[in-house]
Amino acid sequence: MRCLIFANGEIKNYNRYRKYIKGDEYIICADGGARHVRKLQLVPQLIIGDMDSVPLELLQEFRALGCVIKQFPTEKDEVDTELALNEAMKLNPREILVMGAVGSRLDHTLANIQLLIRPVMKGINTCLIGNRHIVSLITPSLPGIIEGEQGDLLSLLPLTPEVRGVKTRGLKWNLQDNTFKFGHPYGISNVLLEDNAAIKIKEGIMVLIRVLEEV
């Protein structure tokens, strides 16, 4: 199964997100992410969080349609997106897409990138989808597979002190058994030469950031 999580970040163009909706997903809203689901005319299975950014009438509307509401205290150790990811991992999906989690708040964006580690280490393909970026993690057991168009931009950054054995295919600057070290970001602004590309590593965790055209 696939799981879609809608965070409370900014979504500028809903049409960009519609292509990820196939109709058979389990949909979780992290608090105010319920607003995005309403605009997409979807009904979530679960809304979770401290409910400080979702209108009460919207909660009541979704509850009447069978949605489960799980409310947590405002003062808690987990951010709402983390609570949503925890629930998603319980379902053991093959893929988790987190919408509205890459935005203008750098602290939130960095936190959301770190949140990808747990599901990815469990072997679940997980990524953040924002207005201009798609962010995912690459591990030795979970390579990066990219489907796009020639000329698309992407960047590779180490999330661990070192990432070893980096090998790529389909990029302008291909790599063969390279090592990335934290603090030396030479993987910025690579380019797809084909409609698909692949990135594999032997050790560490790599961040893959795809740069989208603004629409």
Image (spheres, helix red, strand yellow):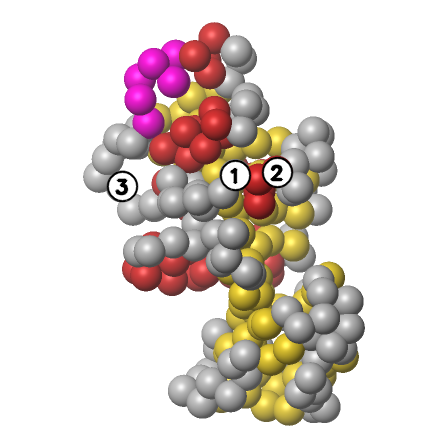
Residue 130 coordinates in the image, percent (x, y)? 49, 52
Residue 83's image quarter?
top left
Pair 2/3: label in front: 2
Q: Circle 3 sits in a helix, a strand or a loop, which is it? A: loop
Q: Circle 2 sits in a helix, a strand or a loop, which is it? A: helix
- Tell me which numbered mark, 3 or 1, is placed earlier along the sequence: 1
Q: Mark 2 points at which residue?
A: 18
Residue 2's image quarter?
top right
In this rendering, the answer to whether 69 lies above or below 199 is: above
Q: Mark 3 points at which residue?
A: 76
Q: Which residue lies at the image location 41% right of the left edge and 87% below the top edge?
A: 183
- Left or right of residue 31: residue 115: right
Marks 2 and 3 close (CB-CB < 8 Å): no
- Left or right of residue 30: residue 209: right
Q: Circle 1 sits in a helix, a strand or a loop, which is it? A: loop
Q: Which amino acid does label 1 sit on?
A: Tyr
Task: Decide if residue 118 is in sight here.
Answer: no
Task: Decide if residue 148 is in sight here.
Answer: yes
Front residue of 127 and 85: 127
Pair 3/1: label in front: 1
Specify few, some or many for label 3: CA neighbours under 10 Å numbering under 14, 14-19, or 20 or more: few
Q: Give the range drawn in magenta.
A: 54-60
Residue 36 coordinates in the image, percent (x, y)? 45, 33
Q: Mark 1 points at which residue?
A: 14
Marks 2 and 1 close (CB-CB < 8 Å): yes
- Residue positioned most to the front: 215
Q: Which residue lies at the image location 27% right of the left edge and 41% below the top edge?
A: 76
Secondary structure that dominates the magenta span: helix
Residue 11's image quarter?
top left
Q: Which residue lies at the image location 45% right of the left edge and 89% below the top edge?
A: 184
